[in-house]
Amino acid sequence: MTFDYVLLGKKLREVREDSNIDAAEAAFRLQISLEDYLKIESGEKKATGDQVVLLAALYQEDFRYFVTGDYPSARSQIQEMFRLNASLSKNDRIAIKIFVRLCEYESFLEQEIFNKKYSPLPNYGQRQFGHNYFKKQGAEAAKFERERLQLGKSPIRDIFDLMRNQDIHVFKRQLEDRNISGLYINHPTAGHCILINYLDDLYRQNFSAAHEYCHALFDSALEQEVTYFKQETNELEWRANSFAGNFLLPKECIEENYSPATEYENWINLIRHIAETFRISAQVVIIRLLEMEWIDEDLKKQLMSEKRLVIKLQEKFDPEIPPDLSTGQKERLTHVIRHGLSWYFIELCTKAYRDGEITYQKLLEMFSLPLEQGYQLLNDFRTFLEVVDL
């Protein structure tokens, strides 16, 4: 069967344009003229295998997408996301595509190598709530989920671990657009995939994770969603915010363990204590107290601007960073998390390598880091190339 170079060129052009990469940059990567590169995209000139691999690396796509007619990928979800969010920068587009690759690698390791069986999430989008109030649906779904997961009224210590136990692939990464808090993709093979913007405060990241969890529970049929701050007119965002607030901080828990304060100073102490216990921002606590009618609108406005309710970074901890690592290791792990990896993913990859399931080169490839950073990461966490003495 003759290979279709016209189709290959079409795929290369679409992926390049989606990534906001100039044809001149692609030509430079291949060390050929712009004219010759454009001929590859038009199908007039045949691309070599090495050229396809180089372009796949530049565009952060699996090269099999370009050379296999029926290779399963999230191309349609990514393309629609980029179309609906045209302001995404080139770097953020590449970051999103790297995130999708990491989800694919994680799914491959979990299912193909470690034989993990995925269980479907509840689809609350098909549930009959008996009303069309989106915020109320979010609150009710949060209660249903807490019951299903047997969480009771306890604080959720690690929302990321909880989501992974629900077979959701969740990563953090620093994005250039500060207005983005997170995004969701329903991958055709990897399933539910969530990315949280690492630029946010750690407690805000917890809220964003619960918010995107709601999109996975309700909106998987949309296949993709980008969450921006202050999307006041979007009913899906109202529902997801309501879910996140009620899931992380049930009003029953407040009612059972706390009492309304009588003095302003006591309100500050109460709100800080609840925020630190449940690992959420003081703003989320204040909104919950307003909904419960413990405070009025005037007190809410005063508390929202209270500087003493700002919980400093050194008073928090990232549940994604194991507490038994050294200070230096924690700093380096923070750096790689900022660039898209997770401790869970690193452990999964290194276990596959130690078990002989993947090669050292594949291990480095899965990290999606420059080679030097990949070697340094493995050195930090004591995974080395095994040399057999023949």
Image: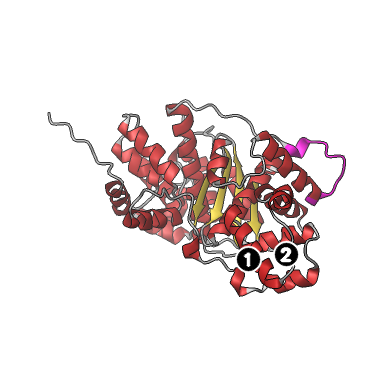
Vertical comparison of 99 with 122: above or below: below
Label 1 amino acid?
Asn
Q: Residue 125 in magenta? A: yes
- The quarter of the image holding the C terminus is top left
Residue shown at 83%/36% (left/top)?
128
Viewer-proximal residue, 297 or 253? 253
Vertical comparison of 79 with 191: above or below: below
Label 2 amino acid?
Ala
Residue 20 seen in this snapshot? no
Q: Residue 233 in magenta? A: no
Viewer-proximal residue, 139 or 171? 139
Local packing at callout 1 (Cα closer than 10 Å; few below 14, some 14-19, many 20+) is some
- Tell me if 77 is positioned left or right of 68 in this view: right
Indicate which disc residue 261 carries.
2
Residue shown at 52%/64% (left/top)?
176
- Cβ–Cβ under 8 Å for marks 1 and 2: yes
Q: Is mark 1 on a helix, strand or loop?
A: helix
Q: Residue furthest right?
A: 130
- Tell me if 341 is positioned left or right of 371 in this view: right
Q: Position of residue 328 (x, y in %)?
A: 32, 57
Return the disc, 1 or 2, that comes first in the chain's sequence: 2
Q: Residue furthest left?
A: 390
Q: Where is residue 44 in the image (x, y as percent from the top left)?
A: 46, 46
- The residue that mark 1 highlights is 269
Q: Where is residue 94 in the image (x, y as percent from the top left)?
A: 49, 54
Residue 334 seen in this snapshot? yes
- Tell me if 45 is positioned left or right of 75 in this view: left
Q: What stretch is highlighted in magenta?
A: 124-135
Local packing at callout 2 (Cα closer than 10 Å; few below 14, some 14-19, many 20+) is some
Q: Is mark 2 on a helix, strand or loop?
A: loop
Q: Position of residue 367 (x, y in %)?
A: 39, 46
